Amino acid sequence: MECTINWTGPQGMLFVAKTGSGHVTAMDGAPEGGGNNLAPRPMEMMLAGAGGCAAYDVVLILKRGRHEVLGCDVTLTSERADTDPKVFTRIHFAFTVSGRNLPAAAVERAVKLSHDKYCSASAMLGKTAEITWSVIVNEAP
């Protein structure tokens, strides 16, 4: 896996990342850190990556189990250390999954499998952060 990061220049702290799969995204800093608030912060991107990784796992596991999953949202809340490096110290994943006849036990199992076995991003972040999760299952109309 490869990623190239380019600083856009001396007028701020905007960086453009090009991934090995050919996609482009931007990262910026807060004005008090020299940025212009044009894009997410790098640490926000890490948190979003962990959420995307876990949600991807949950949907894939449920689909492979032939469950009719129609929606999957995850909200992450976090805390960081007060001193540098300001690593994540706590991250909570709050999943809301919807589907038709979707057993809560199947959703909880999928989330647990993602957390315990499959999600590389949360496994790495779990080296410094206490990772917790919760699940709400909604019946889709």
Image (tube, rainbow, N blue to C red):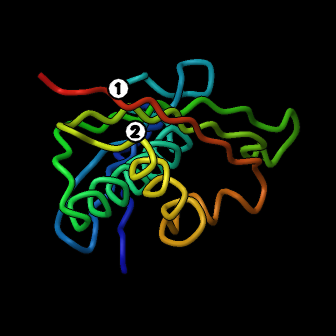
Task: Residue at 53%, 19% (x, y): give it.
Answer: 31
Q: Residues within 10 Å of mark 2 (few under 14, many from 20)?
A: many
User: Which residue in the structure is indicated by mark 1?
Assistant: 38
Nearest to the observer: residue 14 or residue 131:
131
User: Which residue in the structure is indicated by mark 2?
Assistant: 14
Q: Position of residue 35 (x, y in %)?
A: 49, 28
Q: Position of residue 15 (x, y in %)?
A: 39, 46
Q: Position of residue 138 (x, y in %)?
A: 31, 26
Q: Quadrant of residue 23?
A: bottom left
Q: Quadrant of residue 102?
A: top left
* The residue positioned farthest toward the left in the image shown: 141
Task: Residue at 37%, 49% (x, y): give it.
Answer: 55
Amino acid type shown at disc 2? Leu
Dots 2, 1 in contact, CB < 8 A: yes
Question: Is residue 90 depicted above or below 140 in this figure?
Answer: below
In the rendered image, which quarter contains the N terminus? bottom left
* The residue positioned farthest toward the right in the image shown: 83
